[in-house]
Amino acid sequence: ADLDADADAETIASLVEATEALETGLDEAEEWDDLQTNEQLMAEGFYDVLGHYKDYPVEWAALKEHEQQGNVDQILRALDALGSEFMERHCMEALIRMGDAEAFEEMHARAQKRDKPGIEALGKMGPDATEAVDTLIEYVDTDSDPQLQKVTFRALGEIGSEEATQPLANKLEMDDDNVRPLAARALGLIGDTRAIDPLADTIAEDEDRTVRTAAAWALRQIGTREALEAAAEYDDAKAYTLQAEAKKAREALDAAAVEA
């Protein structure tokens, strides 16, 4: 209903007062939540590592100390409790650098929501994150999200499960020139000999120099005689980067022959 400024002055004043009281209550509730969060972290020892610190906020200073000391549990605690984007980013960066499997459950849960830092953190855990491979393989075909594919391919390569070999080999024929090299490199990191033929075909047929070079690099990482021979064939290639990889493969073959 419309209010008349004169006739309903008392009602308007009451509404204004109620609005101000609500805003004050919300502000105080937010401050109380922050206080409760800080008290909870304090009770759980999050701030105990602080000595003379220079960084602000103090949570960031504490986070750095916990990373140096390998306290994954405290970093996960901060990640859960602190709501700022700033602290979330720094917590995730710390967990990625640490690559500690103690954070697997939380990072896997994030990866299941297509969280890229969570996927990256899983990759840094290497074989300790093998249980996440099925989740990551689901993202291999997400051509509509190249950034998700990139971080997924890299993580699968770092984890090293041969279960990912065929899905990644299939992506050697995808259209995106920026993503194909990562599929090749991931196959090299996994080291499955079943990838030799697809990688050799990529060098022979792909028109992109970066992709061909990545495939040659991957063959060198696989490192069997067959893989090295497939890469070494291109030691006279016009593309310098491909030629360099091929020469390294040739040198590896020569070294193996001498040792034999």
Image (spheres, rainbow, N blue to C red):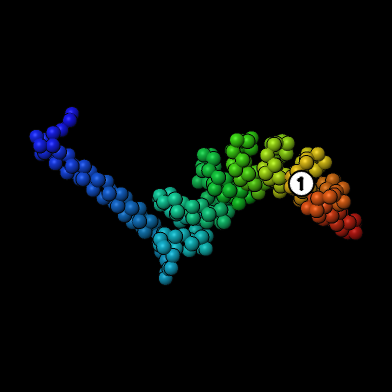
Residue 221, x across and y down, in percent: 76, 51
Quadrant assignment, res 251: bottom right
Quadrant assignment, res 23: top left
Residue 171, x across and y down, in percent: 70, 37
* Observer-nearest of 78 and 16: 16
Q: Residue at x 46, y 51 (%)?
A: 88
Q: Can you see residue 234?
A: yes
Task: Check disc 1 and report its element: helix, strand or loop.
Answer: helix
Q: Which residue is mark 1?
A: 209
Q: Residue furthest top?
A: 1
Quadrant containing the N terminus in the rendered view: top left
In the drawing, does residue 78 fall left or right of residue 204? Answer: left
Q: Residue at x 69, y 36 (%)?
A: 175
Q: Say above or below: 141 vs 217.
A: above
Q: Can you see residue 256?
A: no
Q: Say above or below: 62 vs 215.
A: below
Label count reads 1
Q: Residue at x 80, y 43 (%)?
A: 203
* Observer-nearest of 209 and 225: 209
Residue 16, x across and y down, in percent: 18, 42
In the drawing, does residue 220 fall left or right of residue 157? Answer: right
Residue 167, x across and y down, in percent: 69, 36
Quadrant containing the C terminus in the rendered view: bottom right
> Few, some or many C-alpha atoms within 10 Å of disc 1 (few <14, some 14-19, many ≥20)?
some
Q: Amino acid at mark 1?
A: Arg
In the drawing, does residue 20 fall left or right of residue 11? Answer: right
Q: Residue at x 73, y 36 (%)?
A: 173
* Observer-nearest of 159 and 211: 211
